[in-house]
Amino acid sequence: MKLGCAIEYAGRTVEVPVEKIKWLESLGYDSVWTAEAYGSDAITPLAYIAAHTERIRLGTGVIQVGARTPTMTAMQLATVDQMAGGGRVIGGLGLSGPQIVEGWYGSPWGKPKDRLRDYVTIINKIYAREGYLEHDGPEIRLPYDGPGSSGLGKPLKSMLHFPQKPKIWLGTGAPAMVKMTAEIADGWLAFGMRRGNVDTFKAWFEEGFARAGNGKGYDDFEIQGGVSVTITDDIKGALQANKPFVALYVGGMGHPTLNFHHKRMHREGWGEAADRSLELFQAGKREEAIEAVPDEYIDEGALIGDVDRIKKRWRDLWEDMPYTGVTVRSEQDEAYELMADLTGARDQAD
């Protein structure tokens, strides 16, 4: 299983830990991931990282599709990829939510499933360069001919050629969206898959593969999970330290009637706890919302404990998950080293 790392995206200033990323590359880490919300963007740091690294793949986890047209996304990803030597960039795309899409970017939420399909289809047309770019979709039309149009738009073809095109992955979680991801994308940024619901997600992948045709299957599709790793003898304290983040996202991210993190926790089998945490958070009882997040929920989705406990839980709960890679999040260098040893990444780097 390949390993990834991620950099902070919600800080007050932009800080790219280049030396740490170079060290992780030397340990055999396969990918580094950026993200964006409504502060720093996800693509610019990848260009900086590319200039200081040699082989580590450069992924966005995720670009918000409401922030850019699909043509600009295709241009930016391909530009970084060619500056990085080719074959290194993964464009991870996601929808975000209506509060950000409409409140920050000033774009309509519309029909998100249709928009995402249009978006990926247009990017693939650009990279294929099989003709002048035209698209007649339910959400996006090129050339544009809607309100305010001059009527002078013309189909164009990218001047840039793409001997190695960036991969397009999607960060999705709902059944219809996961099926579409397996159908049209090169990979999936896992959202809501845990050991207890793997068979459900596999059924969705396989339905998407069947829709794609051409024999598409798991060999043509990457799945990137994520895991928080903490080496400690104080398991209870480490579990507690992870709860505020969960409570914030389940209770406070998005609108109370449309919160994808709350829905995710339901899909993971923890619906009652999700509802309770949301209710308390929305009532202004943040500490109680944090306490409503079960220890077991945190423990199930992380690797916490001494080295022996982490090794055992990795073997028992993680090693045979259908991930092709996992993004490791930790504040401990020794945790990154431990994961490199557990997965054999360090040996492959040597």
Image (spheres, grey):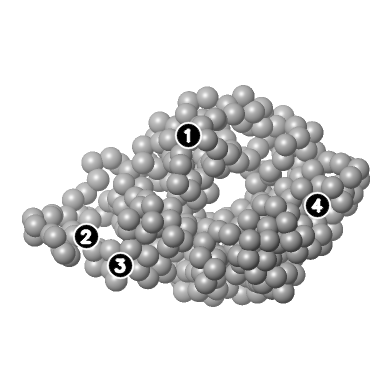
- For disc 1, the marked residue is 45
What kind of residue is marked 2? Leu
- For disc 3, the marked residue is 139
Q: Are marks 2 and 1 in contact (CB under 8 Å)?
A: no
Give the numbered dot on residue 239: 4
Around disc 2, counting alpha carbons within 10 Å, would you say few (fewer than 14), some (14 to 19), or many (20 or more)? some
First in sequence: mark 3 vs mark 1:
1
The percent position of residue 115, horizontal first and vertical second, equals 36, 65
Q: Secondary structure at mark 2?
A: strand
Q: Secondary structure at mark 1?
A: helix
Q: Are marks 2 and 3 in contact (CB under 8 Å)?
A: no
Query: Can residue 127 be spotted in the picture?
Result: no
Residue mark closest to the camera, 1 vs 4: 4
Q: Say which of 263 and 337 sits in front.
A: 263
What kind of residue is marked 4? Leu
- Side (left or right) of 41 relative to 286: left
Give the numbered dot on residue 142: 2
The percent position of residue 265, horizontal first and vertical second, equals 66, 67
First in sequence: mark 2 vs mark 1:
1
Q: Secondary structure at mark 3?
A: loop
Residue mark closest to the camera, 4 vs 2: 4
Image height check: is 141 above or below 33? below
Tell me which residue sits at (37%, 59%) in the image.
102
Q: Are marks 4 and 2 in contact (CB under 8 Å)?
A: no
Between the C-alphas of marks 1 and 4, the distance is 31 Å
Q: Tell me which corner region of the image, top left, top right, bottom left or bottom right, holds residue 274.
A: bottom right
Between the C-alphas of marks 3 and 1, the distance is 30 Å
First in sequence: mark 4 vs mark 3:
3
Between the C-alphas of marks 2 and 1, the distance is 29 Å
